[in-house]
Amino acid sequence: QVQLVESGGGLVQAGGSLRLSCAASGRIFSNYAMGWFRQAPGKEREFVAAINWSGGTTYYADSVKGRFTISRDNAKNTVYLQMNSLKPEDTAAYYCAANRYPDIRVAVTTTSRSYTSWGQGTQVTVSS
């Protein structure tokens, strides 16, 4: 198991930016693809972005493509989500998660059931 702790959430105006961080401990961080999901009140958890074990491959949900950037620093056991041009509809609790596989396979990596460890979440609120 990998233990994950998110940080960096907060309140921001529409059009603003935030950077989320997810610090990992436990098993070897670089063995796993990592993902970010989000969940708004009354809605199901949805996929946001994923990055493979080396950081060389990324994948994004259409709703955030071009605005969000996922990255990782394996030396620091940390994955990041840079969020720019934020919209009120981005308001949600954001969760990072460790995948059971090292590489991205879109049909698998975008589903929550392929992730074995989850953080506690960090709230992002975008005001209009």
Image (cartoon, rainbow, N blue to C red):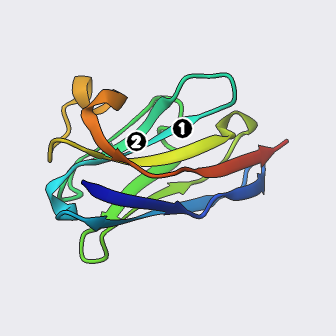
Residue identifier under label 2: 49
Q: Is residue 90 left or right of residue 38?
A: right
Does residue 97 sit above or below 76 in this rendering? above
Residue identifier under label 1: 38
Image quadrant occupied by the C terminus = top right
**Circles 1 and 2 in contact, beta carbons < 8 Å:** no
Give residue 103's quadrant in the image: top left
Q: Residue furthest right?
A: 128
Q: Nearer the viewer, mark 1 or mark 2?
A: 1
Question: Residue 67 or 100: which is nearer the viewer?
Answer: 100
Q: Please give the name of the residue rendered at 60% of the width and 64% of the height, measured from the top-left corner.
A: 8
Q: Please give the name of the residue rendered at 20% of the width and 55% of the height, measured from the top-left corner.
A: 56
Q: CA distance from mark 1 to mark 2?
A: 10 Å
Q: Residue furthest bottom?
A: 75
Type of the residue with mark 2? Ala
Question: Residue 101 or 65: which is nearer the viewer?
Answer: 101
Residue 126: image x %, image y %? Answer: 75, 46
